[in-house]
Image: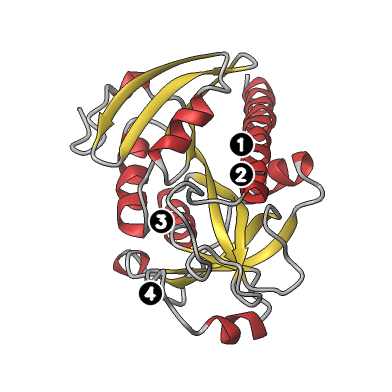
């Protein structure tokens, strides 16, 4: 059955999928594959499938925000995928975090409106432990902790969330984590800090020219680092699956 938004052949989706928001980042990630093919493109959803160091992997962009991210997640699960890594950006909420810092969320505050349609807010949005561990093994220097997912990019209450020890804010993770737990699939994330809300360096706060682009050079470098790390984590998770499979034989 062809999913109505991804419009892809389910047989051409790998069990493990990377989930950037930006379609251009999906293209960039696919360029790191050993082999890759664009298997679908519709709306914000650009889907590539290939291999990395022999491991099958897909990448699918989700657009901005929880609603479209969960549409992609639901339809990829329909296609047989069971392991997901969001590869995204975020705004730091702790003063000591510079542009380019990488974060591995262990859980997310559910400030978006999509996941409450699946479960009440008392249901936690927790990243899958195996995905968190694989990313941590690859990125021991990354910050780990709780982040905040919110629907409003131009919110103003960041100091409150910072006082709670929340590391950063972004727009997709809590919905992906909560829905994945309910669906019985594995989802985690690695995020690159694109600016610091407390220090006034977030992209919504600074003055820009058309030629500068969305991200600073420090953030661009961090994004490349997180892409490489996510792909290495795919290998670790693939090896884990093989060991489990051999153990059941």
Front one among 220 and 211: 211
Label 4 Cα crowd, 10 Å radius (few <14 / some 14-19 / many 20+):
few
Instruction: Look at the numbered disc 2 and give the secondary structure of its residue.
Output: helix
Instruction: First in sequence, mark 2 or 1: give its number.
Output: 2
Q: How far apart are marks 4 and 1 (CA)?
A: 33 Å
Helix, strand or loop status at disc 3: helix
Crowd tier of the residue under label 3, counting other residues whose Cα lies within 10 Å: few below 14, some 14–19, many 20 or above: many
**Quarter of the figure with the C terminus:** top right
**Residue assigned mark 1:** 227
- Given this view, does label 2 or label 4 mark the residue nearer the observer? 2
List the residue tagged with mark 3: 179
Q: How crowded is mark 2: few (under 14 residues within 10 Å), some or many (20 or more)?
A: some
How far apart marks 2 and 1 lie (CA) works out to 11 Å
Spatial CA distance of label 2 from label 3 is 29 Å
Q: How is the image coloured?
A: secondary structure
* Label at residue 120: 4
- Residue under the image location 55 percent in, 53 percent down: 89
Mark before the other along the chain sequence, 2 or 3: 3
* Nearest to N terminus: mark 4 or mark 1: 4
Badge 1 marks a residue whose secondary structure is helix
Q: How far apart are marks 1 and 3 (CA)?
A: 23 Å
Q: Nearer the viewer, residue 226 or 70?
A: 226
State yes or no: discs 2 and 4 in contact (Cβ < 8 Å). no
The answer to whether 226 appears left or right of 180 in the picture is: right
Circle nearer the N terminus (4, 3): 4
Where is mark 2, residue-wise?
Answer: 220
The answer to whether the residues at label 2 and label 1 have Cβ atoms under 8 Å apart is no
- Which image quarter holds the N terminus? top left
In percent of width and height, residue 179 lies at 41, 56
What secondary structure is found at the residue carrying circle 4?
loop
Residue 112 in picture, x, y percent from top left:
39, 69
């Amino acid at each position: 059955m062809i999913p109505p938004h991804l419009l892809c052949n389910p047989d051409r989706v790998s069990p493990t999928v990377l989930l950037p928001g930006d379609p251009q980042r999906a293209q960039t990630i696919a360029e790191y594959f050993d082999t890759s093919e664009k298997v679908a493109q519709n709306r914000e959803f650009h889907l590539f499938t290939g291999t990395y160091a022999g491991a099958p992997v897909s990448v699918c962009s989700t657009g901005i925000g929880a609603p479209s991210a969960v549409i992609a997640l639901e339809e990829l699960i329909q296609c047989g995928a069971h392991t997901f890594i969001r590869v995204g950006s975020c705004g730091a909420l702790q003063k000591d975090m510079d542009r380019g810092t990488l974060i591995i969320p262990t859980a997310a505050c559910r400030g978006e409106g999509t996941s409450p349609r699946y479960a009440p807010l008392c249901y936690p949005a927790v990243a899958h432990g195996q995905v968190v561990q694989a990313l941590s093994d690859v990125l021991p220097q990354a910050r780990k902790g709780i982040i905040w997912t919110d629907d409003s990019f131009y919110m103003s209450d960041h100091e409150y969330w910072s006082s709670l020890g929340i590391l950063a804010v972004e727009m997709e993770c809590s919905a992906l984590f909560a829905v994945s737990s309910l669906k019985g699939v594995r989802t985690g994330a690695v995020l690159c800090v694109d600016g610091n809300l407390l220090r006034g360096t977030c992209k919504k706060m600074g003055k820009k020219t058309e030629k500068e682009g969305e991200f600073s050079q420090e953030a661009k470098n961090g994004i490349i680092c997180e892409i490489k790390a996510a792909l290495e984590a795919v290998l670790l998770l693939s090896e884990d699956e093989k060991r489990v499979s051999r153990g059941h034989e």
